[in-house]
Amino acid sequence: MTKDVYQTWENYMLSCMGDSAHDKEHVYRVLYSALEIAGEEQDVDYDVLICACLLHDVGRGEQFENPSLCHAQVGAEKAYRFLTERGFNEDFAARVRHCILTHRYRNNNVPESIEAKILFDADKLDATGAIGIARTLFYKGQVSEPLYNVDTQGRIQDGTGDEKPSFLQEYRLKLENIYSYFYTDKGRMMAQARRHAASDYYENLLAEVCPIYEKGRQALEERTGFHV
């Protein structure tokens, strides 16, 4: 790989970025984490890995505009076309496409190559710990979804089994469970080191807001004389 080749991939990535939760810094974190994970693995094709990391979220814009689309599928095809149109051989482009196609958590496409497994783990690592919480809050705000849902009795829902989207629903659905979905030992170890930061935030958020609702509604009813 030459510097010009790297910058070709990087510039295409930069031209596709527009989501604060999946911005260029997310891409660089994924790339740098992938390189750390790859250092513990054998027979890694670093050109494929670096290219796939840089381009793994180039389909995010299309999914943001049309949520029925899968950014992994869109991005895989965009990356493949981009690479083949610029003279990269078809085998290389196909291997990068496989990595991108299989990197998504909510996806039935399973990563098979070592490069795809490393990308999957590096991307999931950025959804763990404090950075995972911050990115999820960014995204939920961007799509105008709430921190939590409240039931008909005025009680805060902790996210378990919620039908309506919220930050707490996303935590219980994805962030809490993601630690079981790593392919590499290094990725799993890095994720576990961050786990308490995420769980502590979730528990502290509930501990702060639930009493406010419970005591506040009771106080309001006492002051107004009617049930709210």
Image (tube, rainbow, N blue to C red):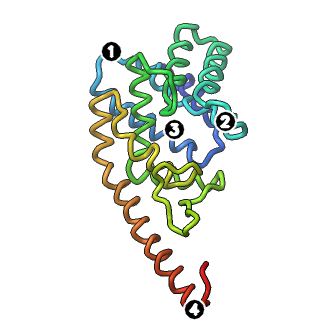
Numbered circle sitting on residue 63: 2
Residue topped by disc 1: 43
The type of residue carrying mark 1 is: Asp
> Circle 3 is placed at which residue position?
27
Q: Amino acid at mark 4?
A: Arg
User: Which label was assigned to residue 223?
Assistant: 4
Of labels 4 and 2, the one closer to you: 4
Question: Which comes before the other along the chain, label 3 or label 2?
Answer: 3
Q: Tag 1: Cα neighbours inside 10 Å, few (<14), some, or many (≥20)?
A: few
Q: Report x, y in % for residue 64.
A: 67, 40
Q: CA distance from mark 4 to mark 1?
A: 70 Å
The residue positioned 49% from the left and 28% from the top of the image is 103
Determine whether label 4 and label 1 are within 8 Å by CB: no
Which of the two marks, 4 or 1, is nearer to us in this view?
4
- Helix, strand or loop at disc 4? helix
Give the residue displayed 34% in from the left and 36% down from the top. Answer: 180
Q: Position of residue 213 (x, y in %)?
A: 50, 74
* Front one among 80 and 163: 163
Residue 181 seen by the camera:
yes
Looking at the picture, which amino acid does disc 3 mark? Val
The single residue placed furthest to the right in the displayed view is 65
Question: Residue 125 appears in which quarter of the rendering?
Answer: top left
Distance (Cα) linking label 2 and label 1: 33 Å
